[in-house]
Amino acid sequence: MEVIQVILLLLAGYIVFAVDKKKENVPVPVILVLIGIGLSYIPYFAHLELSKQVLYDIFLPGLLFISAYKYPPRALRKHAGVIAVLSTVGLLASALLLGMVIYAAAGMFAGLSFVGALLISSILTPTDPVSVVSILKQSSIDEEAADVVDGESMINDGTSVVLFGVLAGMYMDGKSFNWLSFLGEFLLLGLGGALLGVGAGWLLSKTIHVTHHREYQVMLSIIAAYGVFHLAEQLGISGVLAVVASGIMLGWEFEHTNKEDHYREALNGFWNVVEPTILALVFLMIGIRAMDYLTLDGWGLAVLILAASLAIRFLVILLTMESFRGWRDFNDWRTCTLISLSGIRGTMSVVLLLTLAQEASSTGETELILSLSFAVVMLSLVIQSLGIYPLAKIMGSGGKRNT
């Protein structure tokens, strides 16, 4: 990637963010992706590379750290149970049910193994709300639902990567699905990353207290965000869960200090600039590279998978909300529908796709998995992003909760 290309992409991103000041009519990511698709027809951008290393090793740790560290500890305390269930048990149940649907549906169109079907569902399980959260909060729906969407997406990014890693290993090694092996590896990777992140976040919060210059505090946060991520990856545990846990722990510790505003002001000044910069580059490049993977003939199957994923997500959310007493009076079909539709597939799904494309051998089944998954991701980005604002306005008032 050339420097001039980066500058031009940042300029395009700046224009989009500047025009959509309120971020309420259409989520910025879908606009950036559509612009990227248009840029792919310009020869100067047509050969721009988007590798798994760029997304996973450079862009992703920063985005994850920002969302985790900025997530309100108050919301985490209040909704920890709902978020934990949705991003772990709920995610596994959703992936299994969707995998079964894909396996049955794909059998009518093309041959696909059960592990391959589960691999597709694992690619589609992480959610990427980005500006969808701000839309929900600006609509008439209770902000608590938006907090759940934001918190769930933050955690399920990590659990979905662990799920994908286990299934991708089975797929590339030609192994059949084994529950004991799957659960053992899932728990090892997930818990190991989370524990490392909690320790790193606590250590960072204590070190920042003795670092008096704001510039050095920011420098330390960069070291922590990327350091814990890559340390976890080197140890063979989840780097995504590690950096999410460290960001959450840092935010939690900040709330218990008298100088919280001082520390947050220093870090926000830097990370609030980094976040839109990364988002602009990521979604523009996803759009530019989209045409490489959108070679699928069976778009009907992709639409079916998207519809099934939304229906399964709705069911899981409905059952989860019903199991928590505090949410039962808020457990109506409007709220569950909005939370379901807010689970847009985006950055993390593309990271997993690129990982599979680079590491798996090129076979007919692999190509089917890649093209089918990318088609569903693009449909999710466009359809769900365009639908969430009018739906939130129409349905939000019916789900308003009095607190």
Image: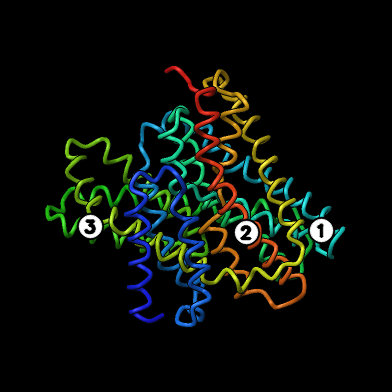
SS for callout 1: helix
- Residue under numbered circle 2: 164
SS for callout 3: helix
| Residue under the point 58% across and 63% down | 352
Q: Amino acid at mark 3?
A: Val
State the image coordinates of residue 43 (x, y, percent, origin top left).
Answer: 49, 82
Decide which of tag 1 and tag 3 comes sooner along the chain.
Answer: 1
Q: Amino acid at mark 1?
A: Ala
Q: Mark 1 or mark 2, which is nearer to you?
A: 1
Q: Mark 1 or mark 3, which is nearer to you?
A: 1
Q: CA distance from mark 1 to mark 3?
A: 49 Å
Q: Are marks 2 and 3 in contact (CB under 8 Å)?
A: no
- Residue under numbered circle 1: 106
User: How many marks can you see?
Assistant: 3
SS for callout 2: helix
State the image coordinates of residue 69 (x, y, percent, origin top left).
Answer: 34, 47
Q: CA distance from mark 2 to mark 3?
A: 32 Å
**In the rendered image, the vertical position of residue 77 relative to residue 326, given as above or below:** below
**In the rendered image, the vertical position of residue 326 relative to residue 267, given as above or below:** above
- Residue under numbered circle 3: 218
Task: Name the residue furthest right.
Answer: 108
Decide which of tag 1 and tag 2 comes sooner along the chain.
Answer: 1
| Residue under the point 59% across and 24% down | 331
Decide which of tag 2 and tag 3 comes sooner along the chain.
Answer: 2
Q: Quadrant of the C terminus?
A: top left
| Residue under the point 48% across and 67% down | 36
**In the rendered image, the vertical position of residue 56 relative to residue 188, given as above or below:** below
Q: Amino acid at mark 2?
A: Phe
Along the line of sight, the residue nearer the viewer: 102 or 38 = 38
Q: CA distance from mark 1 to mark 2?
A: 20 Å
